[in-house]
Image (spheres, helix red, strand yellow):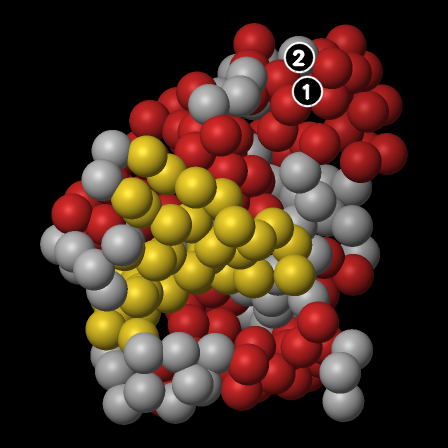
Amino acid sequence: MTKIILVRHGQTIWNVEMKYQGQTDIDLTEKGIIQAQLVADRLAKEPLSAVYSSDLSRAFITAKAIAAKHTLQVIAVPELREINFGDWEGLTYTNINSGWPQTMNKLFTCPEEVIIPGGESFPQVKERATAALARIAHNHPNETIVVVSHGGTIRTLICAALNIHLNYVWNIKQDNTAVNILEYHDNRIMVSLVNDTGHLTEK
């Protein structure tokens, strides 16, 4: 069995300000750095063979904290980036809803059908992220690895693993440094954990 531990990055200032980040490279807040250390502590005893990450700094710094516990180097994979929010990046929900009300409504009711202005669609994210994850899993048979990514991307990967429609992508909660686990058993992927943030409340 190959076990992939999917981790969302720590908190950023745009998370706090409720701004859409997408592929804009935003750093972690002080709280986000603490969260990264806490999830690293949680995963310190896992027998990790490798740590992969989106190349965006909020994910990469979170991944570096995890990798440091295992004397591993983080491998950057651009295909693990967040969905490209295009013209919406840096804007709040209120800003976007006032400028693109119909598109914004459809993003939450039928996200699979929306192409974000100047950005991506969820099917495009699914195509690039699932291909990247499949390559990673193939390269690590019967090993445990960590993949650090982003809320939208992880939701998409979980939808793909469960073979559910991308219109349900927002039904999957993903908090900062949430831990999710995918287990690869031959040709079957089992989702054994979703959005676990116990490491943030245990201390």
| Residue that label 1 marks | 107
Q: Is residue 89 left or right of residue 184?
A: right
Rate crowding at label 2 as few (under 14), some (14 to 19) or many (20 or more) other CA atoms within 10 Å: some
**Considering only vertical position in the picture, is 100 above or below 2?**
above
Residue drawn 48% across the image and 78% down it: 43
The relative height of residue 92 versus residue 119 in the rendered view (above or below) is below
Name the amino acid type tagged 1: Leu
The mark closer to the camera, 2 or 1, is 2
**Which of the 4 image quarters holds residue 46?**
bottom left
Closer to us: 134 or 126 = 134
Q: Nearer the viewer, residue 142 or 177?
A: 142
Q: Identify the mark at residue 16; answer none if there is no mark.
A: none
Q: Name the spot of residue 4 as percent of width and height, x first.
A: 37, 56
Foreground of the two, 150 or 47: 47
At a point 86% along the width and 34% down the height, the residue shown is 94
Specify whether residue 25 is in view. no
Which percent across, then down, holds residue 121? 49, 21
Residue 89 in the image: x percent, y percent?
Answer: 61, 41
Which amino acid is tagged 2? Answer: Cys
Quarter of the image for residue 186 reads top left
x then y, percent, for residue 84: 49, 36
Give me the C-alpha separation between circle 2 and circle 1: 6 Å
Q: Give the quadrant of the N terminus.
A: bottom left
Residue depicted at 25% across the width and 33% down the height: 187
User: Which mark, residue 110?
Assistant: 2
Residue 35 in the image: above or below residue 183: below
Q: Please report the residue visible at 37 percent of the width from the left and 65 percent of the height from the top.
A: 146
